């Protein structure tokens, strides 16, 4: 099919459709000159091999591109793991660590198409355009080798002018997706099976492009806001072998708007010898030039027309007038402070196994992100296609784009070292005009003995070029060097660090919201964007499995579901998702608010708004891998603590007693469209039924852009007659945020009770049970033996990333699940999930594995186990033991009660319940079974 632009200077032949195809497993194609032969199979392009069931059926011998990181003893493999082995089979391959396609192939594959070249193309420049091949391409035309390209993030373009003949021609492409001399890292999301998969094929536009021998090869557009102009670097290619001269005309007009802003055209003359030449031109944008930002993403389309006698060319491209820069410890866009509220895009595309190349698909993703209060995406170790930039330009999103690497040997004088420079140059040449392209590191978390020195030079190189359309840093994660325009690290910038286990602020310190990370950034000179914030897990939603009807299959979910069923808890799936999901949201809220409270911070990058389906299966999203909601938090609820404007409360504590005042300081982070004038912040404290018990206003004020803006303080006495949950609600100009707090009686009434409270099943307790008495067995932490729950590391927070990939970093659990209406909890107000009042219990607790009991008991409070192990864990259960009645709790309710109001209240609630008529457990559990839980 022939197509032309308006001036009929550029003509295209679309090469999409059927191609001849052949897999080259033995690397015979080059020696046997397959480019001279007709290939034996067929395939449709654009597309991939696994998409069309090409390759090798996936199985236990498949060599994936990616580490599983799980450490196993010598001669043992993942399929020997008892957590997975019972749920594997020979008839269907299942893999626990990431999504898999039915077919897998790493190696060379050949693609071939015959094309008819019109006679009038003779003497013209003809380019082969492959928008997104994966990975290395080698091209032959007829019998002649043209060249090789190993770019990952930009189109592969070949000049075929000297190779094509009028009439029929054969174009043969060998695509090789192996890691060769350029090793970007097998976990880099540009190539890893962990995420998009290491596919083989070509997606996006595939075409031949014909133009004159005098042509525009590239245009770079540099906005100059101070002078209201754009500086243009127009690269002219002259393949005529003769000096040429002529005229260049430049014009621009706004796009995506109803009211078009047309910029006056300017013209200039040029002369060009054979080869390439760059023409620099200053293009005035007019006094009424429209600037680009997240609130007003004003875009222009530039048109450059080149004419010289009968030759000519037309180039069009989009750009935005903006200036994104670092100023001290802050980021600014067009002179106004910016705070990046970001998420990672890790190239997870379950339907296809590769990224979309249409703008509509990317607009959908970005609109979902915007609905959750975000304005930023970091592309982790990969560079997206042009459509992603076009969507962000249109919608007003800030991108951090990386040179497709997560290197293990950076700076060690391998081929990768030069490739990183080449790839970053290619990215800037291809996407540098997009206003959404704002930040650029080399890639993710670099390793190699010389990586720091290498990256110092890398940052210096890019800053010396004078291209100020974006800002530069070493790597996402590290190192922090003085030359960085911004820092991007995880060390001391989030509430749970790698390998912190139970020593993190959320697991070690009692609930509060007055901490921040200012100590981390106090001595730094550049802005800080927190690296990979969050990583909080939720239990898998097995209802999601039906969505995997494309290339990638969720066999990992199949394993986890079969495991849950084998452990007798499949009926609890939905409850596990909702309860662990609510804890996940609490953890993200704590992380994000801490970042917004931190002086010297300029943003955070969540890992992740949506699920990360690889690296052991990291179910860290409040959205699934399809960017769809899971049902426990809405976008509006998430925006309460993640938005352009967020009220913040600094509580020194969130658990109070009735003799204390509820006190906190109120501040705000404001990065909205406009400053807020004459605002009167309002607050109220409501009870569990939504009734207002206290309310007031803070001083009227003007709020400029920034965070750490102090609004005032609240200090109130709230009278209670019983343990109660309350919520503080703060409203600033319609932006509302909330915090749950609890108030317990400072003095509890004495319970007239015959309940014996013990920490071990001693002889007195046994005698009491034998005589029909009541025993509350409250276990000291560390008393339960391995195999019965003692191996389970219980913490307050959700699981960080996952246990499989981290070699069982702690905690191992996903919070609690209970029936709030159970009478044992009548005086310990709770929801069905973990909230802050459970921090004390979870910090002083053991888990009981109740799977071995002869009779199944329904726990009063469950602990939700890791989805890999799926142990039926109880925190609190009741039973008939001998002639007596027992409540057994993994929470230590005897130690340091003077400083633990939650524990005092829980003990009171249990004793009161056990003294009443409703305490009548029916499930019988033997003494030996109880004793069998304890260490000897």
Image (spheres, grey):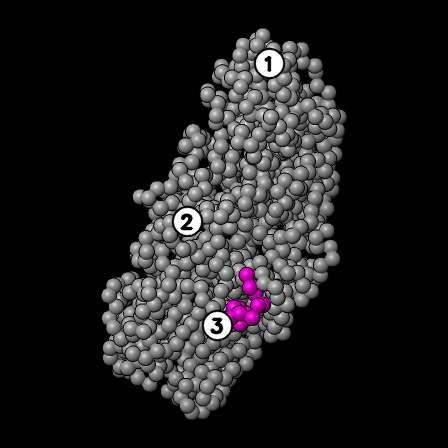
Magenta stretch in the rendered image = 408-421
**Between 639 and 35, the one nearer to me in the picture:** 35
**Other-residue count near label 1 (Cα within 10 Å), few / some / many at <14 / 14–19 / ≥20:** some
Q: Is residue 470 magenta?
A: no
**What is the residue that sits farthest to the front in this orientation?**
75
Q: Give the mark nearest the N terminus, 3 or 1.
A: 3
**Between 495 and 657, the one nearer to me in the picture:** 495
Residue in the image at 55% along x and 38% along y: 812
In the picture of the structure, the residue carrying the numbered disc 2 is: 99
**Between 304 and 218, the one nearer to me in the picture:** 218
Give x and y (percent) for residue 610.
49, 48
Distance Cα–Cα, label 1 vs label 2? 52 Å
Query: SS class of the residue under badge 2?
Result: loop
Give x and y (percent) for residue 419.
51, 70
Label annotation for residue 302: 3
Give x and y (percent) for residue 16.
31, 66
Query: SS class of the residue under badge 3?
Result: strand
Tag 1 and tag 2, C-beta contact below 8 Å: no
**Between 182 and 495, the one nearer to me in the picture:** 182
**Other-residue count near label 2 (Cα within 10 Å), few / some / many at <14 / 14–19 / ≥20:** many
In the picture of the structure, the residue carrying the numbered disc 1 is: 766
Residue in the image at 54% along x and 81% along y: 280
């Amino acid at each position: 099919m022939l197509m032309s632009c308006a001036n009929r200077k550029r003509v295209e032949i679309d090469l999409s459709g059927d191609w001849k195809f052949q897999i080259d497993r033995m690397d015979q194609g080059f020696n046997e000159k397959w480019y001279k032969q007709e290939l034996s199979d067929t395939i449709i392009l654009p597309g991939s091999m696994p998409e069309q069931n090409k390759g090798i059926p996936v199985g236990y011998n498949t060599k994936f591109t990616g580490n599983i990181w799980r450490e196993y003893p010598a001669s043992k493999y993942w399929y020997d793991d008892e957590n997975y082995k019972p749920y594997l089979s020979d008839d269907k391959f299942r893999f626990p660590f990431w999504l898999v396609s039915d077919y897998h192939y790493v190696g060379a594959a050949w693609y071939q198409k015959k094309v008819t070249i019109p006679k009038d193309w003779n003497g013209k420049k003809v380019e082969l355009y492959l928008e997104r091949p994966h990975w290395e391409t080698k091209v032959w035309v007829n019998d002649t080798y043209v060249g090789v390209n190993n770019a990952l993030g930009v189109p592969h373009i070949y000049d075929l002018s000297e190779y094509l003949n009028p009439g029929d021609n054969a174009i043969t492409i060998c695509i090789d997706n192996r890691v060769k001399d350029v090793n970007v890292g097998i976990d880099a999301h540009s190539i890893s099976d962990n995420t998009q998969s290491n596919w083989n094929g070509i997606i996006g536009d595939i075409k031949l492009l014909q133009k004159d021998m005098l042509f525009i090869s590239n245009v770079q557009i540099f906005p100059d806001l101070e002078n209201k102009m754009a500086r243009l670097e127009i690269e002219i290619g002259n393949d005529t072998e003769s000096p040429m001269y002529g005229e260049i005309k430049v014009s621009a007009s706004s796009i995506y708007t109803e009211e078009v802003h047309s910029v006056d055209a300017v013209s200039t003359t040029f002369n060009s010898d054979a080869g390439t030449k760059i023409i620099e031109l200053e293009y005035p944008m007019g006094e009424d030039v429209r600037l680009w930002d997240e609130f007003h993403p004003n875009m222009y389309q530039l048109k450059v027309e080149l004419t010289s006698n009968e030759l000519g060319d037309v180039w069009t491209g989009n750009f935005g007038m903006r200036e994104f820069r670092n100023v001290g410890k802050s980021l600014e866009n067009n002179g106004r402070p910016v705070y990046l509220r970001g998420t990672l895009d890790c190239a997870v595309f379950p339907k296809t196994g590769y990224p979309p190349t249409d703008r509509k698909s990317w607009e959908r993703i970005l609109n979902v992100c915007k609905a959750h209060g975000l304005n930023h995406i970091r592309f982790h170790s990969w560079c997206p296609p042009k459509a992603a930039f076009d969507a962000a330009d249109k919608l007003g999103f800030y991108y951090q784009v990386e040179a497709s690497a997560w290197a293990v040997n950076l700076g060690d004088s391998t081929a990768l070292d030069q490739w990183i420079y080449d790839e970053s140059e290619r990215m800037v040449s291809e996407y540098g005009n997009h206003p959404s392209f704002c930040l650029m590191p080399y890639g993710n978390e670099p390793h190699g003995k010389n990586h720091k020195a290498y990256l110092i030079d890398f940052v210096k190189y890019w800053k010396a070029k004078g291209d100020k359309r974006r800002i530069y840093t070493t790597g996402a994660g590290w190192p922090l060097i003085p030359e960085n325009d911004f820092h991007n690290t995880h060390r001391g910038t989030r509430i749970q660090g790698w390998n912190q286990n139970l020593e993190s602020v959320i697991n070690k310190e009692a609930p509060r919201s007055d901490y921040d990370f200012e100590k981390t950034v106090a001595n730094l000179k550049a802005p800080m964007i927190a690296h990979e914030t969050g990583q909080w897990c939720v239990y898998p939603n097995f209802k999601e499995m039906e969505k995997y009807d494309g290339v990638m299959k969720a066999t990992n979910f199949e394993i986890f579901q079969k495991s849950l069923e084998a452990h007798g808890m499949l009926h609890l799936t939905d409850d596990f998702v909702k309860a662990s999901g609510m804890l996940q949201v609490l953890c993200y809220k704590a992380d994000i608010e801490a970042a917004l409270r931190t002086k010297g911070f300029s943003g955070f990058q969540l890992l992740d708004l949506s699920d990360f389906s690889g690296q052991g299966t990291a179910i860290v999203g409040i959205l699934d891998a399809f960017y769809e909601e899971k049902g426990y938090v809405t976008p509006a609820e998430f925006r309460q603590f993640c938005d352009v404007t967020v009220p913040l409360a600094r509580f020194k504590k969130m658990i109070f007693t009735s003799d204390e005042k509820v006190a906190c300081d109120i501040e705000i982070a404001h990065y909205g469209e406009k400053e807020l004038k004459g605002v009167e912040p309002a607050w109220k404290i409501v009870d569990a039924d939504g009734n207002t018990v206290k309310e007031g206003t803070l001083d009227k004020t003007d709020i400029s852009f920034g965070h750490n803006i102090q609004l005032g303080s609240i200090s109130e006495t709230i009278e209670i007659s019983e343990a109660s949950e309350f919520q503080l609600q703060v409203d600033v100009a319609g932006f509302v945020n909330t915090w749950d707090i609890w108030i317990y009686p400072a003095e509890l009434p004495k319970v007239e009770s015959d309940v014996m409270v013990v920490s071990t099943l001693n002889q007195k307790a046994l005698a009491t049970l034998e005589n029909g008495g009541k025993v509350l067995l409250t276990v000291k932490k560390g008393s339960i033996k391995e195999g019965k729950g003692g191996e389970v590391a219980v913490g307050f927070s959700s699981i960080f990333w996952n246990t499989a990939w981290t070699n069982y970093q702690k905690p191992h659990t996903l919070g609690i699940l209970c029936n709030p209406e159970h009478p044992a909890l009548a005086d310990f107000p709770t929801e069905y999930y973990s909230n802050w009042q459970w921090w004390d219990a979870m910090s002083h607790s053991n888990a009981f594995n109740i799977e071995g009991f002869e009779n199944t008991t329904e726990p009063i409070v469950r602990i939700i186990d890791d989805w890999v192990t799926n142990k039926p864990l109880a925190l609190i259960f009741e039973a008939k033991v001998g002639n007596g009645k027992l409540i057994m709790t993994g929470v230590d309710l005897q130690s340091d009660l003077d400083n633990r109001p939650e524990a005092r209240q829980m003990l009171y609630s249990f004793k009161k319940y056990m003294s009443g008529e409703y305490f009548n457990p029916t499930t019988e559990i033997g003494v030996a079974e109880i004793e069998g839980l304890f260490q000897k």
